DNA sequence: CCAATGATCTGCT
DNA sequence: GCAGATCATTGGC
């Protein structure tokens, strides 16, 4: 699975990232779950309302990392899309394939399969922090995005814990992996059926 | 300056 | 499976 062309739109890049590898300081994971966020066109994106100090990295060149902190956890995105479009792919989960000892040390009492299951857990396992925001992924820095083995299949579905734009199936997973989080609707919008009161 | 929001995680039932 | 904790960023007064 080669690293996809990161200048494409996020929802085209996202499925191509499944099976690729993310390495930080000797710890490597195989990406098994991602979500696409398409900047100002996407109500669920941090970039929807335009550029702010926090999301500035997403407006920068593709192939860089966008790290943000929320609820006391870090989440990381691969910046992609045509220049200036602020598209990004959130890395939601991965399987640790190298550096297991270091990974286990960072997450004591957690089963191997869920060391990097969930965005916040993944960054903690890899040791990614806000200091890695806007770091380049393709030029041999501390954080590197590398090609990996091709996966048997890639499944698409609605995004997790996003309160808007559920109709876009921009969550991509490797269905063969045990490190993928369960489908779950956002608490505020979990009712798939149209809630009443149209007019 | 203050209050609300949010791409989450963990623990308990 | 569900409710609560917890923290930085944002928008408004």
Image: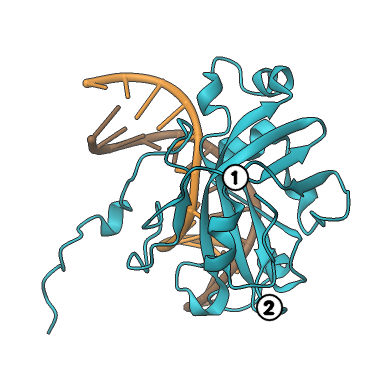
Chain colours: A cyan, B orange, C brown
Question: How busy is the neighbourhood of tag 2: few (under 14 within 10 Å), some, or many (20 plus)?
Answer: some
Question: Is B10 positioned to the left or the right of A29 in the image?
Answer: left
Place residue A27 in its image quadrant: top right
Residue A11 position within the rendered picture, expressed as x and y whole percent measured from the top left: 52, 67
Same chain for the residues at labels 1 and 2, yes or no? yes
Q: Is residue A156 above or below residue A97?
A: below
Looking at this view, is A67 or A176 the one in front?
A176
Looking at this view, is A171 or A130 the one in front?
A171
Name the residue that disc number 1 marks. A150
Q: Is residue A101 above or below residue A84?
A: above
Q: Chain of mark 2?
A: A
Q: Is residue A72 visible?
A: no
**Is there a contact, CB below 8 Å, between mark 1 and mark 2?**
no
- Is label 1 or label 2 in front? 1
Name the residue that disc number 2 marks. A82
Question: How busy is the neighbourhood of tag 1: few (under 14 within 10 Å), some, or many (20 plus)?
Answer: few
Q: Is residue C9 above or below residue A161?
A: below
Q: CA distance from mark 1 to mark 2?
A: 25 Å
Q: Secondary structure at mark 2?
A: loop
Residue C7 position within the rendered picture, expressed as x and y whole percent measured from the top left: 61, 44
N-terminal of the pair, mark 1 or mark 2, is: 2
Q: Residue at x 12, y 85 (%)?
A: A199
Q: Is residue A42 visible?
A: yes
Residue A70 position within the rendered picture, expressed as x and y whole percent measured from the top left: 57, 49
Q: Residue at x 37, y 67 (%)?
A: A164
Residue A197 position within the rendered picture, expressed as x and y whole percent measured from the top left: 11, 76
Q: Residue at x 82, y 55 (%)?
A: A138
């Amino acid at each position: 699975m080669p690293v996809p062309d990161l200048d494409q739109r996020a929802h085209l890049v996202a499925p191509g990232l499944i099976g690729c590898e993310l390495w930080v300081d000797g710890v490597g994971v195989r990406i098994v779950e991602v979500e696409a966020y398409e900047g100002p066109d996407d109500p669920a994106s941090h970039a929807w309302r335009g550029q702010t100090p926090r999301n500035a990295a997403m407006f920068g060149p593709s192939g860089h990392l966008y790290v943000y902190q929320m609820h006391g956890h870090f989440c990381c995105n691969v910046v992609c899309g045509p220049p200036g479009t602020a598209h990004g792919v959130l890395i939601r989960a991965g399987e640790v394939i190298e550096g297991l000892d270091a990974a286990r040390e960072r997450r004591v009492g957690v089963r191997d399969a869920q060391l990097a299951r969930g965005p916040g857990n993944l960054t903690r396992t890899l040791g990614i922090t806000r200091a890695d925001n806007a770091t380049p992924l393709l030029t041999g820095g501390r954080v590197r995005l590398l090609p990996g083995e091709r996966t048997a299949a890639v499944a698409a579905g609605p995004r997790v814990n996003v309160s808007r734009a559920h109709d876009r199936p921009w969550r991509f997973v490797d269905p063969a992996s045990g490190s993928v989080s369960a489908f779950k609707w956002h608490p505020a919008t979990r009712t798939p059926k149209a809630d009443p009161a149209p007019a």
